[in-house]
Amino acid sequence: MRRTRIIVPPLTSTPVRTFHNSPPLCALDAETDDIETTYILPSRQRTRKARSRFELGEVIGSGKFAQVRKAVDSETGEQVAIKIMSKQTCTRAMLEHELEMMESITDDVDHQRYAPFKGSYEDDRNVYFVMELLNGGELFDLVADKGALEEKDTAAFMRKLVFAIAALHREGILHRDIKLENIVLQHRRADGEACTNNFKITDFGFAQKMGQDDSFESPAGTLGYAAPEVLSDRQYGPPCDIWSAGIVMYILLSGYPPFPLAPDDGRGGAPSADAALSAELEAILHGRSPLVWKASLKEPPWDRVSREAKDLLTKMLRVDPSKRLRAEHVLAHPFLQSSKRARSFEYHNFV
């Protein structure tokens, strides 16, 4: 079912430390349904005082339709994260989709890179999704603060990320919004530094189960990370997540996102949804034209990046999804084959 799309300006070509988190574009962002205020959960999960079980703490994330807060479960003493979605701003379809995807990931995807879903509760105003608390912050914040990573750290990180994406695809699920903001580090080291070795992929609000044809048409994701076939309303499938992972890899190696838009003269006001999609797609097609792409990879900082890293990046960011590497081919690439120990550590979650 096609729904209205909400589009926001994408990331620019300026260094990561100067850009801000980009809200997503998604088929679920705007519905024409009436606002639902009825219960969606079984009676045993309903209460007028859902907050009474959890001592809510600081806000650690927020968006158009949800807020995430630290909390303590008064029954167990466990620290958790709670995603709170208001029934005044979210439609019933959105809430049911969120619940379905969280339960699907928990039941079907056996992988350590996905934060476990601990349960849901509901009162007459909100639905509460209880999740594991991750204390390391978003990968976005780490890169914005520190800049590009070393190649060896990027390779180790990408291996883990693609293993996790492969596990998701194996169970017939597309994430559709892989980005720095949705990769959360589990903890920080004793010196306060974030550790990229331990992370989890979060936010499955845009995830979708694949049908028999394994393809979709309604755009979903975040500008700056969305694959060209998503932007052009073409059918798309698992390769769209590989494209988004390629964008993450590009930023980790360079410190800034690819495919800058043409400068805005400021006279046209906010672009329409279709105009924003078209501008993003045009920027990608220009940036991935052979001459422009090859020239860009010879300029700083790419002149200091290995041939293997640039080769993998090129193959993950192919415009034609049929020619883009699949997850298993990414994992077999020489750039990700440098550490046998790291490979064996993840292997049990992939076979």
Image (cartoon, rainbow, N blue to C red):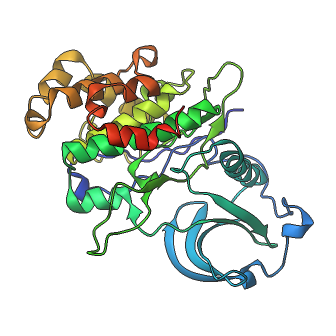
Left or right: residue 11 compared with residue 85 = left
Quarter location, residue 330:
top left
Q: Which of 204 and 161 is in front in this view?
A: 161
Q: Does 261 appear above or below 95? A: above
Q: Does 78 appear above or below 20? A: below
Q: Which of 266 and 134 is in front in this view?
A: 134
Q: Where is residue 152 in the image (x, y as percent from the top left)?
A: 22, 43
**Image quarter hosting the N terminus:** top right
Q: Position of residue 228 (x, y in %)?
A: 43, 26
Residue placed furthest toward the right:
43
- Residue at image coords 29%, 74%: 192
Q: Where is residue 302 in the image (x, y as percent from the top left)?
A: 13, 35
How many marks do you count on the picture?
0
Q: Position of residue 44 (x, y in %)?
A: 89, 69
Left or right: residue 209 compared with residue 329 = right
Quarter location, residue 328:
top left
Left or right: residue 217 compared with residue 31 = left
Q: Can residue 87 be seen in this view?
A: no
**Image quarter hosting the C terminus:** top right
Q: Can residue 59 be seen in this view?
A: yes
Quarter location, residue 6:
top right
- Residue at image coords 23%, 41%: 263
Q: Which of 65 and 250 is in front in this view?
A: 250
Q: Does 282 appear above or below 126? A: above
- Residue at image coords 59%, 49%: 204
